[in-house]
Image (cartoon, rainbow, N blue to C red):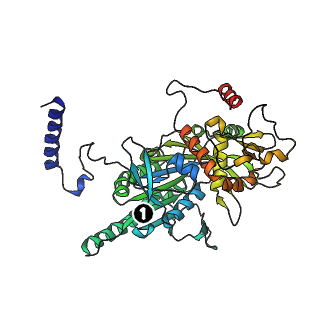
Amino acid sequence: MSKKEKEADLQDFLLSKMTQKAPRSAEWGTYEISRSNKKIMSVIKYVLTTGITTFDDVVGGFPIGRIVELFGLESSGKTAMALLAAARAKQGFISEVIRAEDGTLSYRPLNPDEFEVAVLYIDNEGSLDDDNKIKINGQELDVITGRCDTIEGVFKMTDDFLDGAELKNEMDDRSDKPGKLRFYIIVVDTIASTSSREDLAQAWGKRDYPRVPGEISKGFTKLTRRLSKNNACMICTNQVRTAYSAVQESRGKRGSVQSWLYSSPGGLSLRFYASHRVYVQTLNTIYRLTPEAKFAAGFQIGFRTLKNRLRSPLREGRMVLLFDKVQGGFHNDFSLLENLIYTKFIEVAAKEKGTDFVCKFSRHGVVPTTFGEAQVKTTLDEDDDAPTPRRGSRKDPGFKFRAEWPKFYADHKADIDKLWQAAVDFTFNTPGLDGIVVDEDDLEQADEEA
């Protein structure tokens, strides 16, 4: 018998003895043991996708059975993302995580007819307008809403919601008819706006020590296992705080996502228990679709992953939040454009004007197929100020203004999707990891040789 087989036999022996002596009473809480090559207890089986390609491909969506912290400064899209997640859950956009032998992940969308979803939205910010029906992606939002002043109230409301979920499962177990697969989404918007019951009972102006961090720690300690057991995802928005000088330093650097400048209230418990931590920040206060537009069309938002169980962490991306009454909210096409610009797969030739966008197909080894003979001609050719291509080179296709992008993307979706996939590969393959570093001079040389 080989050494490896003897080691395996020893582990099986110990595992069987531990299983025999495992406590059965509820007072011990969770007590599970297994061989790692047979069962990974912390595996993520399902995810909720947002429909924003840049967020889903870089972050991986929201993992079912886990806690997510979405934190950032004011007006950075936290509530908009929370509402989008709630709406997408009710619309059935949940996928099964498929793991290949090489460790790569892919998603298989579930059939909405085969499962049920319930959503609890704890609106401590007063973000939901009571006088109007909320529509997300053209559909009316239909969720259970709640509001509470204390952190104890948040966890009590969450426990009551999950108690109902577990009771429903018990009823199905006693029934002859098998129940559907069920998912539960809990949104807390925002966890920073709560106090403890003892804090609320204090006399006005009296302050001794903060109690909320301790209550958050106790609440999440009991909640983590219940979320996993019941296919539930808890998404907590959290507003960061910092000195005014740090805010100015961050906003003064255009296009910079500097999560390290800020701290989130509530102590360290939420960041410890969260499997996903995503920082969001408004990057520029005026997002115009044409240079002559007098008013902003929306925000450009940068996001950075600090913890991630589905993708490599410490990755950044871009999203666009529009103000339009009909097509407002996160806009997938413009989010894709800004992420391609951020990764330099699309470049802005006239940066001072914010015009003349050029798709860098040749630089990144992507062969376009949808442009035909017009592949050397672009919408920029109509503009006398457009940059002149290098002699002997073929001009990469492009467009003039951001407003032209949705039609340009629709007309050449197959090529743009290939360009985006190359950008995703670039995002998750750190330059220099295998000793290969590409600098700007090399890229310019590649353009000249294309």
- Along the line of sight, which residue is nearer the eye, 322 or 411? 411
Q: In the image, is 185 to the left or to the right of 245? A: left
Q: In the image, is 27 to the left or to the right of 123? A: left
Work out which quarter of the rendered image holds the N terminus and state it.
top left
- Along the line of sight, which residue is nearer the eye, 360 or 169? 360
Q: Toward which corner of the image does residue 10 lie, by quadrant?
A: top left
- Give the percent coordinates (x, y) of residue 47: 44, 55
Depicted 85 relative to depicted 17: above or below: below
Q: Residue at position x 66%, y 52% from top?
A: 412
- Give the percent coordinates (x, y) of residue 96: 41, 56
- Along the line of sight, which residue is nearer the eye, 127 or 233? 233
Residue 74 in view (yes/no): no
Q: Residue furthest right?
A: 384
- Give the percent coordinates (x, y) of residue 202: 50, 56
Q: Residue furthest front?
A: 373
Q: Residue at position x 71%, y 29% from top?
A: 448
- Along the line of sight, which residue is nearer the eye, 155 or 231? 231
- Few, some or many residues within 10 Å of mark 1 (<14, 14–19, 20+): many
Residue 175 in view (yes/no): yes
Q: In the image, is 133 to the left or to the right of 65? A: right
Depicted 295 relative to depicted 12: above or below: below
Residue at numbered disc 1: 184
Q: Residue furthest bottom?
A: 176
Work out which quarter of the rendered image holds the C terminus and state it.
top right
Which amino acid, by three-letter code, is at mark 1?
A: Tyr
Q: Residue at position x 87%, y 42% from top?
A: 384
- Give the percent coordinates (x, y) of residue 259: 58, 40
Q: Residue at position x 80%, y 45% from top?
A: 380
| SS at mark 1 in the image | strand
